[in-house]
Amino acid sequence: MKRGLLIGSGVVVLAVVGGLFYVLSSLDSLIKEAVETYGSDVTKAEVKLAEVELDLTSGKGALRGLSVGNPEGFETPSAFQLGAISINVDTGATSGDKIVITEIVIDKPDVTYELGGSGSNIDAIQKNVDAYMAQFGGGGEKAAPKEDSGEGPKLIIENLYVRGGTVNVSATILAGKKMTAPLPDIHLKDIGKEDDGATPAEVAEELLTSISDGATKAVAGLGIGKTLDSLKQSLEGGTDAVKKGVE
C-alpha cells in the first residue's frame, strides 16, 4: 500500500515538473503570440514581433523586431518601432497561468507622429485602445472577461523602462522636411501586481497610453499642436521651436 502511494506520488510530482518545464520552454512562443494577438486587438493596427529569445537558466531574454502599424487612414509604415527590448523573467515565480517579469527595458524606440485631416495616428490608436478596454467596464472597473476570450497567462511586470526614444513628425504640409523631438523616458512599476496579474491587453493599454502621452507632449514642445491648422500657423509664423526641429 505504502509502495503504491509512493509510486503514485512520484508520478504526480513528475507530471507537475513536466508541465512546468513545458510552460517555461514555451515562454518564447507564448510571449510572441500574446504580443501580436492582443497588441493588434487593442490598437486596431498590425503588431509584429520578429523574435523572442529567452534563456531558461537565467530568465533573461530579448524581443526583436517589434512594431506597431497604423490604423486605417494613415500612410506612414508604422506608428511605433520599439527598438531593442531586453526582458528578465522570474522563472521561479512563473507558472502555467502567470508570467512574472522583473524588468523590461525598451531602448531607443522610434515613434512616428503622423498628422492627418482628422487628427494624428497616435490619437487614433489611443481611441482604439480606450474603446477596446471599455468592453471590460468603465470608470476603472473592468467586467469579467468572457470565458472563451482565450486571454492566456496573466502578467506581472515589476519594472518597465522606455529610454532614449525619438518622435518623428510626418505631415504632407511639411513638404518632405523632418521634425524630431526626444521621447520622454518612461518608468512603469508593478503592472498587474495589485490584481494578481494583468492580461496582455491591459499591459498593452498601459504601455501604449504612456508612450502616446509622451509622444504628444514631445510634439507639443515643438509648438505644433494636434491639428494641421496649428502646424500650418507654426510653420508660417516661423517659431524658433519649429525652425529648430526642421532639418
Image: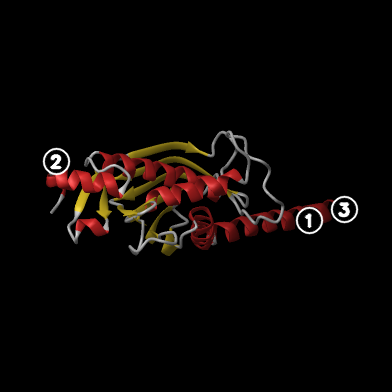
At a point 47% along the width and 56% down the height, the residue shown is 56
Q: Which residue is mark 3?
A: 1
In the picture, the quarter occupied by the C terminus is bottom left
Residue 113: % across, % down:
31, 52
Query: Which numbered marker is on residue 119?
Result: none
Front of the two marks 3 and 2: 2
Q: Which residue is mark 2?
A: 239
Q: Which residue is mark 1?
A: 8
Front of the two marks 2 and 1: 2
Between the C-alphas of marks 2 and 1, the distance is 78 Å
- Which of the two labelled residues, at mark 1 and mark 3, occupies the earlier sequence position? 3
Residue 53 vertical placement versus 127 (above, below)? below
Question: For the residue marked with disc 2, what is the amino acid?
Answer: Thr
Of residues 93 and 65, the one nearer the viewer is 65
Q: Is residue 189 left or right of residue 93?
A: left
Question: For the residue marked with disc 1, what is the amino acid?
Answer: Gly
At a point 37% along the width and 41% down the height, the residue shown is 213
